[in-house]
């Protein structure tokens, strides 16, 4: 690679460079001001805002970074396009909200001088996700996924006050190590079959040469297992409830949104780039007939949303309940990919935006209540709606939105998924998804029953909120309500970011 192409490549990854520089600045400030950590969150916010500005400014640009030269085509390790920019912007917004989240978290405050390490590892996760979203080479996918994973393993057990914190980290790294090894083995088989790890070149090989379909199918199942682990799809979900319960609430919220978004982005890019031969005039994908992606993803979607919802019915711990809820939402999102069309991917983009708002809002309120009461148990929420009405009503809105009821943003997310399924004549999948939504209504309403239909006893005390707490909740609450009524800007933005389909 010559200096000109290196410069061109670096100009295409300005957001990633900003995140990397911010990470280094956090480390430097942490070393210099060892006792005073007040500046570090503001450095983190500044870096994220600048990175977000670069993402938005480059949203209409496309190209390859770190190009691999070949006789006929030039493909890169990273593919930069509006699709990737959408997910990067989503992760930037989530990260900004998580920084505020962590500033208000009693768990993080109690770590004292270790706060610098927390933000350093957080930015390690962000950097891994940013590269993962743009990766167009299997090795780059694996390396960026490992960067994300190593940081998240440590953060899952960052709080050492209880046994469950260390247990969460240990289970996460064991399951993660197994998933990583399985995925790497699958990648090695694909390389042996095709002679390349670049997704674009794999597409060319599959269209022009005969490969052993049995070995290819086996290798793809192994790669899907690695990605399924990241998105908490059944049967790769075993780590999720224990890790979500044991990790700090801020990290649990971050994993439930940002890590899942990166996983879905790379799954979509993998299928579209390596296995789609053509896109017709109405936006339907024509897949290369070497692997039955539709059946595999449909089965995974049904299993994921069904197990997630039914397992959540029996949970008494709010974090475990929201963990299984997160698994169920991964199932709904998989339905958008099963359609294999532009409208299906558009539904996934819309769903992720609203899922970010309502899920972060739910976890934030759980954190506030846990910080004040020391409990995450549903039974201890009795009468909270009476003693702290603002918190109770806000939580009710977020939970109703997670269910997918109007007039909240969650309804719009599910509506577009159902429209995509019906448009693709997959009515059975749409009916299964609707029935799963009905099941989810039970365990969400169960929380509201405890908060509003159970009289407060003498042990329930009013939770006093600071102005910053109220502002944070309102920032998440307003779009959840507004997008349920006026959602055209979000839909238009998602549509404009689907240019990658014609890239």
Image (tube, rainbow, N blue to C red):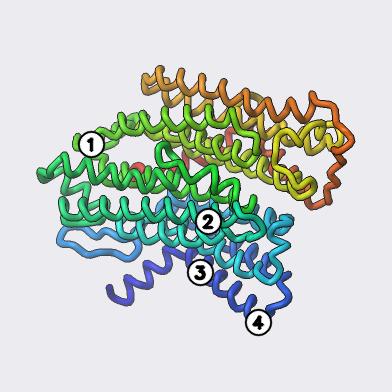
Name the residue located 59 percent from the left edge and 28 percent from the top edge. Answer: 313
In front: 432, or 424? 432
Which secondary structure lies at badge 3?
A: helix
Q: Position of residue 44 (x, y in %)?
A: 63, 65
Report how far apart the C-alphas of labels 1 and 4 lie in the structure.
Answer: 54 Å
Task: Tell me if residue 386 can be seen.
Answer: yes
Residue 20 badge: 3
Compare marks 1 and 2 and give the one earlier in the sequence.
Answer: 2
Disc 1 + disc 4, Cβ < 8 Å: no
**Label 2 environment density (alpha carbons within 10 Å; few <14, some 14–19, many ≥20):** many
Which secondary structure lies at badge 4?
A: helix
For the N terminus, the quadrant is: bottom left
Disc 2 + disc 4, Cβ < 8 Å: no
Q: Which residue is mark 2?
A: 169
In front: 470, or 186? 186
Q: Which residue is mark 4?
A: 32
Q: Check the image and name the residue furthest to the bottom.
A: 32
Report how far apart the C-alphas of labels 1 and 2 lie in the structure.
Answer: 35 Å
Q: Which is more foreground, mark 3 or mark 1?
A: 1
Compare marks 2 and 4 and give the one earlier in the sequence.
Answer: 4
Task: Tell me if residue 344 can be seen.
Answer: no
Q: Which residue is mark 1?
A: 291
């Amino acid at each position: 690679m010559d200096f000109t192409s290196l410069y061109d490549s670096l100009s295409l990854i300005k957001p990633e460079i900003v995140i990397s520089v911010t990470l280094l600045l956090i480390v430097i400030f942490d070393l210099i001001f060892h006792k005073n950590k007040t500046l570090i969150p503001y450095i983190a916010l500044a870096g994220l805002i600048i990175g977000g500005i670069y993402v938005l400014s480059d949203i209409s640009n496309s190209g390859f970074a770190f190009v691999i030269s070949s006789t006929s085509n030039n493909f890169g390790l990273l593919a930069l396009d509006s699709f990737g920019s959408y997910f990067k912007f989503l992760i930037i917004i989530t990260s900004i909200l998580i920084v505020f989240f962590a500033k208000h978290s009693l768990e993080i405050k109690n770590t004292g001088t270790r706060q610098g390490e927390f933000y350093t590892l957080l930015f390690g996760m962000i950097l891994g996700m940013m590269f993962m979203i743009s990766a167009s080479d299997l090795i780059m996918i694996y390396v960026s996924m490992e960067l994300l994973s190593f940081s998240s393993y440590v953060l899952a057990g960052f709080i050492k006050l209880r046994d469950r914190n260390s247990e969460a980290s240990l289970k996460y790294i064991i399951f993660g190590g197994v998933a990583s090894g399985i995925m790497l083995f699958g990648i090695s088989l694909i390389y042996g079959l095709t002679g390349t790890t670049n997704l674009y070149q794999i597409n060319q090989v599959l269209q022009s040469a005969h490969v052993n379909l049995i070995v290819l199918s086996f290798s793809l199942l192994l790669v899907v297992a690695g990605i399924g682990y990241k998105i908490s799809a059944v049967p790769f979900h075993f780590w999720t409830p224990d890790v979500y319960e044991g990790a700090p609430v801020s990290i649990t919220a971050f994993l439930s949104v940002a890590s899942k978004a990166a996983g879905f982005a790379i799954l979509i890019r993998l299928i579209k780039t390596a296995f789609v031969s053509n896109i017709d005039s109405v936006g339907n994908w024509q897949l290369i007939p070497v692997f039955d992606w539709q059946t595999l993803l449909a089965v995974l979607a049904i299993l994921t949303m069904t197990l997630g919802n039914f397992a959540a019915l029996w949970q008494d711990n709010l974090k475990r309940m929201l963990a299984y809820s997160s698994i169920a939402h991964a199932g709904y999102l998989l339905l958008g990919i099963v359609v294999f069309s532009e409208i299906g991917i558009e539904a996934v983009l819309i769903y992720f935006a609203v899922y970010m708002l309502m899920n972060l809002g739910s976890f934030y309120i759980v954190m506030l209540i846990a910080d004040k009461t020391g409990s995450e148990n549903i039974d201890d929420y009795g009468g909270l709606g009476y003693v702290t009405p603002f918190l109770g009503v806000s939580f009710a809105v977020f939970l109703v939105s997670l269910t997918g009821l109007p007039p909240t943003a969650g309804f719009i997310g599910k509506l577009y998924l159902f429209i995509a399924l019906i448009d693709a004549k997959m009515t059975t999948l749409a009916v299964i998804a609707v029935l799963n939504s009905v099941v989810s209504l039970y365990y969400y309403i169960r929380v509201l029953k405890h908060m509003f239909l159970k009289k407060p006893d003498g042990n329930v005390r009013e939770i006093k909120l600071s102005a910053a707490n109220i502002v944070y909740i309102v920032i998440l609450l307003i779009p959840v309500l507004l997008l349920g009524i006026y959602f055209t800007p979000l839909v238009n933005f998602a549509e404009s970011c689907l240019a990658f389909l014609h890239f």
